[in-house]
Image: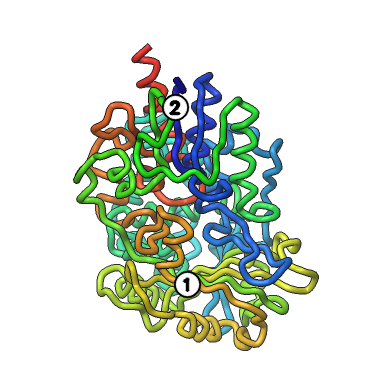
């Protein structure tokens, strides 16, 4: 009998399997698709030689992840590459605010009236970032805080809505860039703890940047899988699990799946009936005949570029998709241009480009023209550079990854208490009513992103249970 079986080979499932194997437990991992990866894959979606990331592309949480940093992933081919700027947010007048590795450069881009306020916001946390991020991403109750005072100070700043936090800024550049940071988790700006979301992304950039993985996000998953195999773990692909009886006997079963799928497979009935799925993404991957023609020079050298004319436009777009049940007329967009740091993603002189906006969960329309009209406001002539498109609305995203229910790439609404306490209001979020069944997906704390910490935290709960059982 195996000690543990893991279902789902996304970054969290892979990390959970690695953590258990590192501690001497026998582990087998089962994945329904023909390759590992989940939200961290790389494929030729458009034209030969253009390597796209179907979901996650830039990895501020990956390079800062306490779980990943404790593993020898560089020995298995993972290499982080950095653009000159982690992120830029261009404006209609050709200027831009930036999120730089340098706090001073970032603050200066906000203008003299907000530079000091930004520095006072982030500088107290940076010297203690590694401890803070471990404490923040290990909650709840998987580890005692190493620095409870700093964590409490972070909570005071971050638990209120982001709209409260941005009141300290007087001008739009700072307000708009920070609103865009919150938009990465598809949460309305006025929600609980959205200030913490923006702070985490900003601090992550200052600490270690927003890199891409050389060759594509698949490199993250492949490194984890290779390490797991070296530890003696088994990886089985093309293996769909529909019920627990499809799996070999084990002392524990760990699911990197949606709560909905876990309840169905493990016979948990309505245990997760209260879990809410959030707004969906509408994503387009582009093969381009050259760089994006951004008007703002800063955007041309940034790995990630946020699109939204001002904080009001971003707020309206997030409300439309999350609360009003309609696609926004001027969507907030997150775009990534991996070739700025990793030119090998496309043939010489060409580029891959990745862009998405938010739409209601399960939306069935086509947002392509709306997205491109929004892009043209900040990069006139963009459409002239397009060689090919790979379009993925909510249905296509869910077909690629079963965890993206209704196209929700955050694996559950990141709003209200569910941002912090997911998938249920519980101090033991990785456990289920079945004593041998656990959940480790992004539907558990600390939530979405390629960081493996949900898998790491769930693995702790599993090995404690296994050791207690003897």
Residue occupying image coordinates x 47% and y 72%: 333
Q: According to the image, label 2 marks what residue?
A: 4
Where does the image place residue 409, in percent across and percent down from the top left? 42, 59
As helix, strand or loop, the secondary structure at mark 2 comes to: strand
Q: Which mark is residue 2?
A: none
The Cα atoms of the two marked residues, 1 and 2, are separated by 40 Å
Q: How crowded is mark 2: few (under 14 residues within 10 Å), some or many (20 or more)?
A: many
Q: State whether residue 262 is above or below residue 382.
A: above
Mark 1 in CB contact with mark 2 (< 8 angstroms): no
| Camera sees residue 226 | yes
Question: Which residue matches tag 1?
Answer: 333
Q: Residue at x 31, y 53 (%)?
A: 193
Nearer to the camera, 134 or 44: 44
Q: Earlier in the sequence, mark 1 or mark 2?
A: 2
Q: Is residue 98 left or right of residue 460?
A: right
Residue at image x 53%, y 86%? 377
Total labels: the figure holds 2
Judging from the image, what secondary structure is the residue with disc 1 in? strand
Q: Which of 48 and 422 is in front in this view?
A: 48
Relative side of 226 to 179, left or right: right
Instruction: Kindly report which numbered mark, 1 or 2, lies closer to the viewer in this rendering.
Output: 2
**From what the image shows, is residue 434 above or below residue 359?**
above
- Residue 343 in percent (x, y) is at 74, 63
Q: Would residue 267 be found to the left or right of residue 232 on screen?
A: left
**Front one among 212 and 243:** 243
Where on the picture, by quarter, is residue 7?
Answer: top left
Where's residue 305, x and y in %? 56, 69
- Is 122 left or right of 347, judged from the image as shown? left
Corner quadrant of residue 365:
bottom left
Where residue 135 sits, quadrant-wise, is top left
The C terminus is located in which quarter?
A: top left
């Amino acid at each position: 009998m195996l000690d543990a079986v893991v279902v789902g080979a996304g970054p969290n499932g892979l990390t959970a399997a690695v953590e258990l194997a590192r501690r001497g437990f026998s582990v087998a991992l089962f994945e329904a698709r023909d390759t590992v990866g989940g939200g961290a894959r790389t494929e030729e979606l458009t034209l030969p030689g253009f390597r796209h990331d179907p979901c996650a592309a830039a990895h501020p949480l990956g390079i800062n992840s306490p779980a990943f940093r404790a593993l020898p992933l560089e020995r298995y081919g993972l290499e982080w590459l950095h653009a000159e700027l982690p992120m830029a947010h261009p404006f209609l007048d050709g200027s831009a605010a930036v999120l730089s590795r340098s706090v001073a450069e970032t603050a200066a881009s906000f203008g003299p009236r907000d530079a000091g306020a930004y520095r006072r916001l982030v500088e107290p946390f940076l010297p203690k970032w590694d401890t803070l991020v471990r404490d923040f991403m290990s909650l709840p109750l998987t580890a005692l805080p190493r620095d409870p005072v700093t964590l409490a100070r972070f909570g005071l700043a971050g638990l209120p809505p982001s709209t409260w936090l941005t009141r300290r800024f007087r001008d739009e550049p700072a307000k708009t860039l920070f609103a865009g940071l919150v938009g990465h988790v598809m949460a309305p700006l006025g929600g609980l703890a959205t200030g913490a979301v923006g702070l985490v992304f900003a601090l992550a950039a200052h600490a270690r940047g927003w890199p891409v993985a050389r060759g594509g996000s698949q490199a993250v998953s492949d490194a984890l899988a290779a390490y797991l195999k070296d530890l003696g773990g088994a990886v089985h692909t093309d293996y769909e699990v529909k019920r627990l009886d499809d799996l070999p006997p084990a002392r524990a079963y760990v699911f990197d799946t949606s709560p909905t799928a876990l309840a169905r497979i493990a016979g948990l009935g309505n245990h997760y009936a209260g879990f809410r799925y959030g707004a969906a993404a509408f994503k387009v991957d582009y093969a381009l005949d050259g760089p994006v023609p951004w008007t703002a020079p800063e955007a041309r050298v940034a790995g990630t570029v946020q699109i939204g004319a001002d904080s009001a436009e971003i707020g309206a777009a997030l409300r439309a998709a999350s609360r009003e049940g309609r696609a926004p007329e001027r969507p907030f967009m997150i775009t990534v241009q991996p070739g700025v740091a990793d030119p090998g993603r496309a043939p010489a002189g060409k580029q891959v480009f990745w862009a998405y906006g938010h739409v209601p969960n399960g939306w069935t329309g086509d947002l392509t023209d709306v997205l491109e009209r929004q892009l043209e406001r900040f990069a006139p002539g963009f459409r002239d550079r397009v060689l090919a498109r790979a379009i993925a609305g909510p249905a296509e995203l869910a077909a690629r990854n079963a965890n993206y229910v209704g196209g929700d790439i955050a694996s559950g609404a990141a709003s209200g208490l569910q941002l912090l306490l997911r998938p249920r209001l519980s101090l033991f979020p990785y456990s289920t009513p079945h004593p041998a069944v656990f959940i480790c997906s992004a539907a558990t704390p600390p939530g979405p992103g390629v960081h493996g910490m949900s898998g790491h935290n769930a693995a702790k709960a599993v090995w404690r249970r296994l050791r207690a059982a003897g």
